[in-house]
Amino acid sequence: MLATMIMTAVVSGKDGLRKLWSRIIRWRVPWPYTAFAILSPIARFILAAVLIRIFQDAWLDLRLLGQANYLPYLGWIVLPLWIVTFGFEEEIGWRGFALPRLQKTMRVSKATC
């Protein structure tokens, strides 16, 4: 994401950064779909917790939620960290910087390969 910001500033200046940020924060998805995208993982998590409780007679250890074996224990801070760093930054680099420039000289199907 940082590389995208730097390259956009170098190539397009402040106007390019303004356009990039406007595309990042623009919300084009209807609210029912947004609610489904947010609530369905929560519903699956609750279902998994209940099934584990039924079949293993134990509750999930929420302290381990989002933990990775290569990171120290970060507590609940790990959830926002995963949300921000897992794919979001790559999408800004690809869709925010590289793809629009590729599509100026290529067909969409070729630019996305």
Image: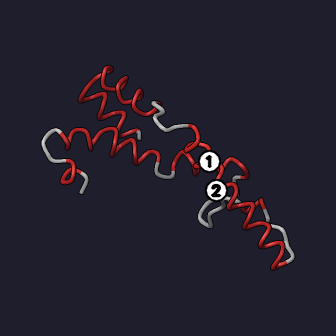
Residue at the limit of the structure toward the left, as seen here = 105
Residue at the limit of the structure toward the right, as seen here = 57
Viewer-side residue, 27 vs 56? 27
Left or right side of 35 for 62? right
**Residue corresponding to mark 2:** 41
> Which element is circle 2 on?
helix
Point out which mark residue 69 bears: none
| Number of other residues with Cα within 10 Å of mark 2, as a class: few under 14, some 14 to 19, many 20 or more | few
Tag 2 and tag 1, C-beta contact below 8 Å: yes
Quarter assignment of residue 20: top left
Left or right side of 14 for 89? right
Answer above or below: position of 55 versus 75.
below
Point out which mark residue 38 bears: 1
| Image location (x, y in percent) of residue 85 | 51, 48
The residue at 60%/48% (across/down) is 36
Badge 1 amino acid: Ile
| Image location (x, y in percent) of residue 28 | 45, 35
The residue at 84%/68% (across/down) is 59
Left or right side of 16 for 106? left
| Image location (x, y in percent) of residue 86 | 51, 52
Q: Quadrant of the C terminus?
A: bottom left
Answer above or below: position of 37 versus 57.
above
**Distance CA(mark 2)–CA(mark 1):** 6 Å
Residue at the limit of the structure toward the top, as seen here = 15
| Image location (x, y in percent) of residue 54 | 83, 75
| Number of other residues with Cα within 10 Å of mark 1, as a class: few under 14, some 14 to 19, many 20 or more | few
Quarter assignment of residue 84: top right
Viewer-side residue, 73 vs 19? 19
The residue at 21%/39% (across/down) is 101
Q: Quadrant of the N terminus?
A: top left
Badge 2 amino acid: Pro
